């Protein structure tokens, strides 16, 4: 399906159809491609040249970080929000690369208009947890906005994180020094190479209040920034990924302060993963939004 304006076309996968058919990412509202002025593409697929098997991600793909699989007894199910209820078998806990789970998918429906798509994921109670989710994708001009509402209709409080895997490749350009990720609230990183989450140096280096690349690399690099790495600033929280050669960029805006940002890159893709952590009590609801503005000189 697609929603569009005169300048922007947004392709959205139907729930249960690739790439919205994994056991990892939210099946509702998975944006598989964004095309500006009918020519410039901004999104890509998760590559296969990684240290772990690819999990089928593509485009703007959200995931919820709530895992009670380890404490779930064999033969019972546990919730993977955005996906469904997964059967615990042979003592195996949840794996984001898993491809062989027995899943009862959450019921999902959607309606579309020319410039808007509304997805509703119905609650199914499991271990006292139940969530009704409404995700609205809307385009205006060259901006795509995702507004999500969770309603806790279960018996237990839920603390979770939603993070969006922004699988971005501006016009298919390979990683290199022309890519610049700007995060205005970030502390100044200087210009030195940055350590990854396991302590090793990769191809990423500081670029003041952001990052760029020391060189092209077909080997994945990553780094992360925690709450203490950000200066105080009122929301919306903003970020921008530009490619100087393509003279194009994506500007992101969030209705929340991130708990952390993980940036990982490989070959032709830059993926800023921006985490929203929240707690929601039974009977309460919570709404947040993310937006992306696409432009070219």
Image (cartoon, rainbow, N blue to C red):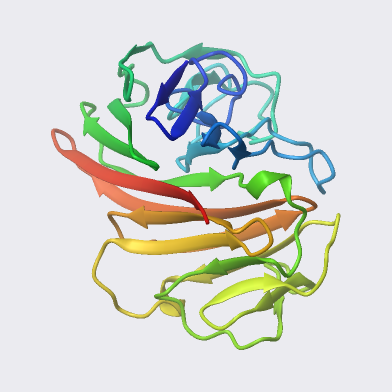
Q: Residue at x 45, y 34 (%)?
A: 8
x and y, in percent, of residue 180 in the image? 61, 68
Residue 55 placement, left or right of 13:
right
Q: Is residue 195 visible?
A: no
Judge by depth and name the residue closer to the eye, 273 or 240. Answer: 240
**In the figure, residue 90 lies in which quadrant?**
top right
Residue under the point 56% across and 83% down? 208
Residue at (43, 30) in percent of width and height: 81
Question: Can residue 183 be seen here?
Answer: yes
Horizontal and vertical percent for residue 267?
A: 80, 52
Residue positioned 85% across, 57% down in the render: 219
Q: Position of residue 40 (x, y in %)?
A: 60, 40
Q: Is residue 19 left or right of residue 132?
A: right
User: Is residue 242 depicted above or below 138 in this figure?
Assistant: below
Quadrant of res 189:
bottom right
Left or right: residue 187 versus residue 93 is left
Say above or below: 206 vs 221: below
Q: Position of residue 197 (x, y in %)?
A: 67, 67
Residue nearest the viewer, comparing 87 with 272: 272
Instruction: Locate residue 190: give its quadrant.
Output: bottom right
């Amino acid at each position: 399906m697609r929603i569009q304006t005169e300048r922007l076309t947004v392709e959205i996968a139907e729930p249960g159809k690739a790439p919205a058919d994994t056991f990892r990412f939210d099946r509702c509202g998975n944006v598989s491609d964004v095309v500006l002025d009918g020519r410039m593409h901004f999104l890509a697929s998760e590559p296969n040249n990684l240290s772990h098997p690819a999990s089928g991600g593509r485009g703007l793909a959200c995931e919820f970080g709530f895992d009670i699989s380890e404490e779930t007894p064999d033969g019972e199910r546990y919730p993977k929000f955005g996906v469904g209820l997964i059967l615990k078998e042979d003592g195996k806990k949840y794996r984001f690369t898993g491809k062989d789970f027995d899943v009862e998918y959450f019921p999902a429906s959607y309606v579309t208009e020319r410039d808007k798509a509304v997805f509703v994921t119905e609650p199914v109670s499991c271990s006292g947890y139940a969530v009704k989710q409404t995700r609205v994708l809307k385009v205006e001009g060259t901006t795509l906005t995702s507004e999500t509402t969770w309603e806790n209709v279960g018996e237990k409080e839920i603390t979770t994180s939603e993070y969006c895997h922004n699988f971005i490749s501006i016009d298919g350009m390979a990683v290199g020094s022309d890519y610049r990720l700007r995060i205005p609230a970030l502390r100044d990183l200087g210009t030195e190479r940055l350590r990854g989450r396991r302590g090793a140096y990769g191809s990423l280096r500081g670029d003041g209040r952001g990052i760029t690349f020391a060189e092209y690399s077909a080997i994945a690099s990553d780094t992360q920034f925690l709450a203490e790495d950000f200066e105080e600033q009122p929301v919306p929280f903003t970020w921008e990924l530009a490619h100087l050669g393509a003279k194009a960029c994506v500007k992101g805006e969030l209705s929340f302060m991130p708990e952390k940002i993980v940036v990982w890159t490989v070959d032709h893709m830059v993926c800023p993963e921006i985490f929203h952590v929240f707690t929601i009590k039974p009977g309460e609801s919570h709404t947040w939004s993310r937006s992306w503005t696409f432009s070219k000189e």
